[in-house]
Image (cartoon, helix red, strand yellow):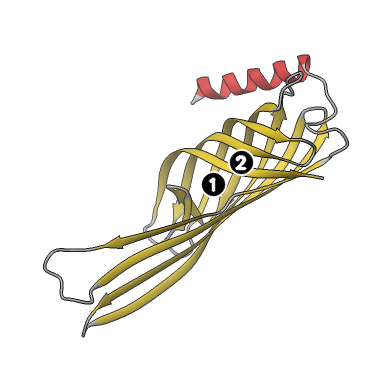
Amino acid sequence: MKKLSLLLALLLVLGAATVAFAGIVDGKKFELSTALSFESISFHYPGEPAGFEDTISFINLPIRFGWFIWQGLEFEPELMLTRYHSHYVDPGNYDEKYSETGWVLSGNLLYNFKLKNSPFVPFVLAGFGFGNGIPFAGYTERYDPGAKSSTPNLGVGVRYLFGHIGALRLEYRYRHFRINDPYEGEIDHVTMNSVFVGMSLFF
């Protein structure tokens, strides 16, 4: 963790000292980035009666709004939302549905490295977030009622620019969640290594 933090900090300092440009896209000061994913899981167990159903689904929506502050430096708040829905049917006994929404709000700083005559723009990222859940396998699952989570965000990534309009965005993110769970009366720690794929629009 310390070595990774030191490496990212060093890349940020070197980038600020050696690379000077007026943003990723000339004349554009802001970036709107998002992605959308849907997951559905069905459980089938041997020996269950006809009509038995146990399904879970997730709709995931990260929303990011970036502001290019100075040269390659960008401030980017991020809101990760997830809608969770489960449906459990045991014919003659149960027909239960349950839904909840989890969220994590983060404030991140990025430094973008614009390569000469190239559509690729690498970047490094560092920030901090908090919320009521933690992202498992791409979705943000709400923890027990009243639980609060917080995490540092460290990452590296690259954008592929499409002219002066938008870009594909790929990034790796390291997070270590600290979850204060009053329901269980304990503090949990969860380390996440994630890959994000999405799109950006510049204006």
Residue that mark 1 sits on: 150
The residue lying toward the viewer, choosing from 95 and 190, is: 95
Residue type at numbered disc 1:
Ser
SS category of the residue bearing label 2: strand
Tag 2 near tag 1, CB within 8 Å: yes
**Which quarter of the image is occupied by the C terminus?**
top right
**What number is the disc on residue 47?**
none
Residue type at numbered disc 2:
Phe
SS category of the residue bearing label 1: strand
Q: Earlier in the sequence, mark 2 or mark 1?
A: 2
In the rendered view, would you say 98 is above or below 70? Answer: below
Estimate the spatial distance between the alpha carbons at disc 2 and disc 1, rounded to whole Å: 7 Å
Q: Measured from the top left, where is residue 109 in percent x and y?
A: 70, 35
The total of numbered circles placed on residues is 2
Task: Pick out the residue farthest to the bottom.
Answer: 92
Q: Is residue 16 left or right of residue 84?
A: right
Q: Is residue 46 left or right of residue 3?
A: left
Residue at position x 45%, y 70% in the image? 99
Alpha-carbon neighbours of circle 1 within 10 Å: few (<14), some, or many (≥20)?
many
Residue at position x 58%, y 50% in the image? 130
Q: Measured from the top left, where is residue 136 in percent x and y?
A: 43, 49
Residue that mark 2 sits on: 128
Alpha-carbon neighbours of circle 2 within 10 Å: few (<14), some, or many (≥20)?
some
